[in-house]
Amino acid sequence: MRVGIGYDSHPFAWGRKLVLGGVEIPNDEGLAGHSDADAVAHAVTDAILGAAGLGDIGRMFPNDDPQWQDASSIELLNKAFLKVVEAGFRFVHADVTVIIEKPKLAPHIEAMEQNLAQALLSGPAHISVKAKTNEGMGWIGRGEGIAVMAVATLAEPAAPRSSGGFSVS
């Protein structure tokens, strides 16, 4: 088993849609960023890439590359996951915590889990998304932005069995 940790944070920005886990959430502000700034998908992407030892989202999809401008982060997660599969790993589980003061995410959690599962070619039972507030503390508590933490577990392929150098006649 391999475990990776992902983290992302973005400030709120006027004139942008709020997209989290591939779900457009009604809000006055979205998140600032080069792509659609989906911090949930970004954190999960970093977690799976870390577990596979394949770097991070910034190396795979640099924010100075115009092809990723306003890109769907759920699609980027799927592209990254296909690299993880190509490297020989199987997705097992992801656990995600979104730290946000408002809007409330409870009505959107199931759709986020479904979108993440689809991007990871898995089922929603393999994804857990939770939302927590920062109890009014710090920049998140003041409503200036959000942070997301994710942990992903991957399984390595089974190693071929070795005879240990002995031959059987």
Image (cartoon, rainbow, N blue to C red):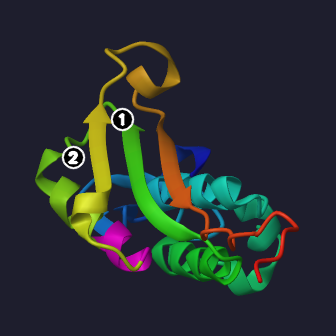
Q: Residue at x 69, y 61 (%)?
A: 52
Q: 88 or 28: nearer the eye?
A: 88
Q: Residue at x 30, y 48 (%)?
A: 129
Disc 1 crowd rating (10 Å Cα; few below 14, some 14-19, many 20+) is many
Q: Identify the mark nearer the N-term, 1 or 2.
A: 1
Q: Position of residue 71 (x, y in %)?
A: 57, 80
Q: Residue at x 59, y 82 (%)?
A: 82
Horizontally, is 109 left or right of 22 in the view? left
Q: Residue at x 31, y 30 (%)?
A: 101
Amino acid type of the residue that numbered disc 1 sits on in the rendered structure? Ile
Amino acid type of the residue that numbered disc 2 sits on in the rendered structure? Leu
User: Which type of secondary structure does the marked residue at label 2 adopt?
Assistant: loop
The label shown at residue 7 is none
Q: Position of residue 79 (x, y in %)?
A: 60, 82
Q: Report the predominant secondary structure element of the magenta stretch.
A: helix
Residue 12 shows up from this direction: no
Horizontally, is 113 left or right of 79 in the view? left
Q: Measure the alpha-carbon separation of dots 1 and 2.
A: 9 Å
Considering every residue shown, the one lying at the far right of the view is: 165
Query: Does the magenta-highlighted stretch encompass residue 117?
Result: yes
Do tag 1 and tag 2 residues touch (Cβ < 8 Å)?
yes
Determine which quarter of the picture holds residue 56.
bottom right
Q: Position of residue 131 (x, y in %)?
A: 28, 38
Query: Does the magenta-highlighted stretch encompass residue 41?
Result: no
User: Which type of secondary structure does the marked residue at label 1 adopt?
Assistant: loop
Residue denoted by label 1? 100
Total labels drawn: 2
Segment tinted magenta in the rendering: 115-120
Q: Position of residue 165 (x, y in %)?
A: 88, 67
Residue denoted by label 2? 105
Residue 148 shows up from this direction: yes
Determine which quarter of the picture holds residue 18.
bottom left
